[in-house]
Image (cartoon, rainbow, N blue to C red):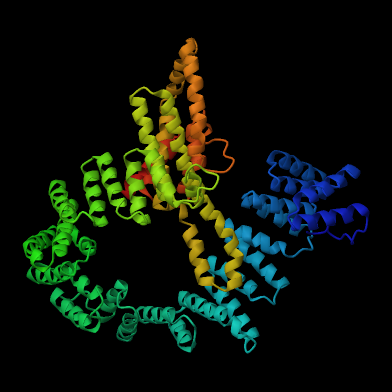
């Protein structure tokens, strides 16, 4: 911690006790530290620094209310103390209040803190807050204090990079290379290699010609990045012939990378040539890479007519004759062209009777293909015919049951689909994939209890009756969001049946699960905090920059969008129909008059307590059924604060975001904001 500005080392008994309390805190002996801190305050109630430390200790001992009261006392006693501001910065950081934490750390430094490590704490908060302008200042100040660590030079370079000052970033990295020349050990060569490539990418942002020359002089450990960068630079400089040679080398390394084939064509200039010309190129590539699927498939994306029929026939039949289950998955991208779909259908239908001559299993996989084919076309009846024939022929293949369940799902029979998927699961009880599919199908059929029973077979259920808690801990988004949607459908069913108590329970559980998705994504965002220092120490600057940019869009992820869209229906309903709760209360008041009804209610409450363990998602959860989330007088404000603001900040260019923004602001009678969302929505659509 930091001493006061201009204050000499203090030797009084109280200050000695305070230093001892700090040591106990740093060794995570919070109770002992708190006892010592309270002793200091009993002797001297004006010891301001001790109030700040007590606030921090109470936070770690899970007493947030008392903690905040001591924050106020510490600031009131001495708002300019560098120790107080440093301690309160740590407190706010642990409370995930990064903006306030940055303010306290900055104030500690402005008031003469002698602990220069605070610059690192401040810079971490600034990058977490995306305050890149001040980040460069903080990282530079920290580097000035600790010049001997390469991580600090890398930190300043990444700060300049995030500010898009590529020249300054390059200059910092070059300066360290000059200072460290001839002094690096073997253990430091990986970090050196990574940072050389990182610097090369920075040079490319300024001058591609210079970046290429720099790359020629490098000898790094990441040869793949070297080759990909060289090819990219050559293409950018118009030296496509040289680039094509590099892409051929890359294909030799990995002939299954579809991207390399497209880039090779771009470098050869064949993308604008006739389909026959391009096909000739790929026929040569097939000879070079006979075991690769890519050069056989890619021509199917641009060929038409008879040549397409010939090539696609060779491609599909070669796979079907070998009994490859994924044959349809491979050709599915071609189904955007109706003409190609008809050609494929004719080829496979003609082959079906001949397939029995090769092998009964080939016939099964051909029928499997045709079922998928008709399902993709929307002909569910034909899809059902082919898959049922395949299952009847060979009732021991798990894949057939998965497809049959999908067909029944498309027919709208979710219960039957779930039962079929479970039938397939029983064929291989060790297979997590089919087990997860069965769970998902039971959730789609709103059979949450059966889904929980199955999913709990593969979860860690210590001190739990099922796997709900473990699935939240493992961040199993697929299960949590499917559960949320299932509970909402159960709520709608209960309302239709006028089963109001069940309806409230299911509504709360639905919001609770949607909120679980929010917590997971907030954890994704908060988890980057440790990497702001870890990546710099490890020298993985390229991966670090990628992570920062990924985090900038984490709340625009499709799973998060799906959760926000799902929960919006609930909060809009709570706002539009507040009388539903009143009707429920009136219903309860009426029942209270009847003695039998009172007994029924007590019995139901006991049953609900029994269900508490079944739905418990977190340790010490005080709102298992989500009652606090739905019993609100401000549903729109809660929706914005808990769910929507993250999406609004990071996904403002999405149709969903502006649609929800319009619906929220219109309900709040904020016409200007509603019209703004509507205008943007019109532009996007």
**Quadrant (top left, top right, bottom left, bottom right) of the N terminus:** bottom right
In the displayed structure image, the side of residue 427 where residue 594 appears, left or right: right
Q: Is residue 403 above or below residue 632?
A: below
- At 18% from the left edge and 77% from the top edge, which residue is drawn? 278
Displayed quadrant of residue 44: top right
| Viewer can see residue 657 | no
Q: Which one is in front, 446 or 607?
A: 607
Of all residues, the one furthest to the right in this rendering is 12
In the displayed structure image, the side of residue 216 where residue 492 appears, left or right: left
- At 49% from the left edge and 84% from the top edge, which residue is drawn? 220
Residue 262 percent coordinates (x, y): 28, 74
Q: Is residue 9 above or below residue 448?
A: below
Q: Which one is in front, 63 or 392?
A: 392
Residue 496 percent coordinates (x, y): 33, 25
- At 83% from the left edge and 45% from the top edge, which residue is drawn? 38
In the displayed structure image, the side of residue 212 where residue 2 appears, left or right: right
């Amino acid at each position: 911690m930091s001493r006061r500005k201009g204050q000499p080392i203090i030797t009084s008994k109280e200050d000695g006790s305070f230093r001892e309390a700090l040591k106990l805190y740093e060794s995570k002996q919070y109770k002992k530290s708190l006892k010592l801190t309270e002793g200091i305050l009993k002797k001297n109630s004006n010891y301001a620094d001790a109030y700040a430390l007590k606030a921090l200790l109470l936070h770690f001992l899970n007493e947030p209310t008392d903690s905040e009261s001591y924050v106020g006392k510490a600031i009131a006693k001495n708002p300019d103390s560098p120790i107080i501001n440093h301690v309160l910065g740590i407190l706010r950081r642990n409370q995930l209040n990064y903006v306030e934490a940055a303010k306290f750390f900055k104030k500690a430094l402005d008031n003469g803190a002698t602990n220069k490590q605070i610059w690192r704490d401040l810079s971490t908060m600034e990058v977490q807050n995306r305050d890149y302008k001040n980040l460069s200042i903080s990282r530079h100040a920290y580097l000035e204090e600790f010049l001997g660590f390469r991580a600090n030079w890398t930190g300043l370079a990444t700060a300049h990079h995030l500010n898009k000052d590529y020249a300054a970033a390059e200059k910092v990295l070059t300066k360290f290379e000059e200072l460290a020349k001839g002094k690096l050990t073997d253990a430091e060569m990986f970090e050196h290699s990574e940072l050389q490539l990182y610097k090369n990418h920075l040079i490319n942002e300024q001058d591609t010609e210079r970046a290429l020359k720099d790359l020629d002089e490098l000898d790094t450990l990441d040869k793949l990045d070297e080759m990909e960068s060289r090819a990219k630079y050559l293409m950018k400089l118009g030296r496509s012939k040289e680039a094509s040679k590099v892409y051929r080398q890359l294909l030799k390394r990995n002939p299954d990378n579809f991207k390399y084939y497209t880039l090779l064509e771009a470098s050869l200039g064949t993308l604008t040539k006739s389909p026959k010309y391009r096909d000739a190129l790929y026929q040569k590539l097939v000879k070079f890479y006979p075991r690769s699927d890519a050069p056989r498939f890619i021509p199917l994306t641009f060929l038409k007519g008879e040549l397409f029929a010939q090539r696609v026939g060779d491609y599909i039949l070669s796979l079907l004759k070998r009994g490859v289950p994924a044959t349809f998955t491979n050709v599915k991208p071609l189904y955007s062209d109706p003409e190609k779909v008809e050609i494929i259908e004719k080829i496979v239908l003609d082959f079906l009777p001949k397939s029995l001559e090769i092998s009964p299993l080939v016939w099964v996989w051909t029928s499997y293909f045709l079922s998928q084919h008709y399902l993709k076309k929307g002909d569910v009846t034909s899809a059902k015919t082919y898959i049922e024939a395949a299952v009847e022929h060979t009732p021991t293949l798990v894949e057939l049951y998965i497809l049959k369940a999908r067909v029944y799902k498309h027919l709208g029979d979710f219960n039957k689909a779930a039962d079929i998927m479970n039938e397939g699961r029983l064929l291989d009880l060790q297979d997590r994939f089919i087990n997860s599919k069965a769970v998902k199908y039971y959730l789609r059929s709103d059979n949450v209890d059966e889904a929980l029973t199955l999913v709990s077979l593969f979860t860690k259920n210590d001190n739990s009756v099922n796997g709900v808690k473990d699935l939240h801990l493992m961040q199993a988004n697929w299960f949590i969001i499917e559960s949320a949607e299932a509970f909402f459908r159960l709520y709608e069913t209960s309302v239709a049946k006028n089963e109001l108590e069940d309806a409230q329970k299911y509504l709360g559980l639905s919001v609770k699960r949607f909120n679980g998705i929010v917590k997971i994504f907030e954890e994704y965002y908060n988890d980057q905090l440790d990497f702001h220092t870890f990546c710099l120490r490890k020298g993985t600057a390229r991966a670090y920059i990628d992570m920062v940019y990924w985090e900038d869009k984490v709340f625009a992820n499709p799973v998060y969008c799906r959760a926000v869209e799902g929960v919006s229906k609930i909060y809009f309903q709570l706002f539009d129909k507040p009388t539903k709760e009143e009707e429920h209360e009136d219903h309860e008041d009426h029942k209270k008059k009847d003695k039998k009804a009172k007994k029924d209610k007590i019995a139901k409450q006991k049953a609900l307590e029994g269900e508490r363990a079944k739905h418990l998602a977190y340790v010490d959860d005080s709102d298992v059924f989500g009652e606090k989330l739905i019993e609100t007088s401000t549903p729109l404000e809660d929706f914005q604060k808990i769910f929507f603001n993250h999406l609004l900040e990071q996904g403002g260019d999405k149709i969903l975001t502006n649609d929800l923004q319009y619906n929220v602001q219109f309900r709040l009678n904020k016409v200007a904001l509603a019209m703004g969302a509507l205008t943007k929505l019109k532009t996007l659509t």
